[in-house]
Image (spheres, grey):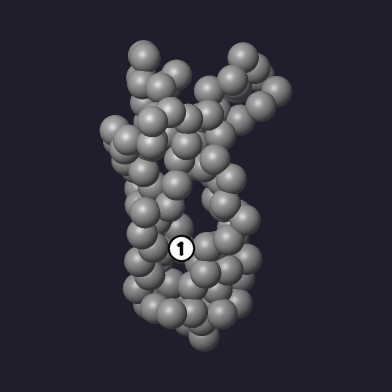
Amino acid sequence: MECITVSNIYSHSLGLLSGITSPEPGLEATIISSCTVTASVFIQIGYFDSRGVQFGDGIEMATVAAGAVYPIYHTARLYGLQRGAMKLAKVISVKAYPQ
C-alpha cells in the first residue's frame, strides 16, 4: 500500500541511563496513513554494530486506522553483549496490507 509512510525515525543505542531516563535500545518512528481503509503495517528493523554490519533484526507490527498518525517504539530484542554492540537500528522494509 503506497498510502503508508514511516517518518521521524530515531535509533537508540545502549546508554548509561538506558531504561531509567532514556529509552531502551531500539527504534522509534511515526507511521502516517493517508489510506482510506485500516491497514496492517509490518516494519522490519535491522540492528547494526559500530562497523555498520547487520547482526540481527526484528519486526514491529501495527494496525493503523485510515488517516491516523501512529507512534511506535521498537525495543531491540537483544541479550548480553549484543545489547552493547548495537549502535544503530534502521528500517529495512515496510509492508502494509488492507484489513
Q: Quadrant of the N terminus?
A: bottom left
- Which residue, as the protein is rendered here, is positioned at the far right? 21
Question: In front: 27, or 97?
Answer: 27
Asked if residue 60 shows in the view, the reply is: no
Up-down: is 21 above or below 5?
above
For the residue labelled by badge 1, is the local secondary structure a helix, a strand or a loop?
A: strand
Up-down: is 11 above or below 34?
above
| Residue 36 pos. (x, y %) | 52, 85
Question: In front: 82, or 31?
Answer: 82
The residue at the point 70 percent across, 23 percent down is 21
| Residue 54 pos. (x, y %) | 31, 37
Give the image quarter of residue 33: bottom right
| Residue 93 pos. (x, y %) | 36, 59
Asked if residue 13 shows in the view, the reply is: yes
| Residue 39 pos. (x, y %) | 43, 72
Question: In front: 65, or 90?
Answer: 90
The residue at the point 56 percent across, 80 percent down is 34
Residue under numbered circle 1:
63
Q: Quadrant of the C terminus?
A: bottom left
The residue at the point 62 percent across, 56 percent down is 8
- Which residue, as the protein is rendered here, is positioned at the far bottom? 36
Mark 1 Cα within 10 Å, few/some/many (few <14, many 20+)? some
The residue at the point 29 percent across, 33 percent down is 55
Up-down: is 93 above or below 51?
below
Which residue type carries mark 1? Thr
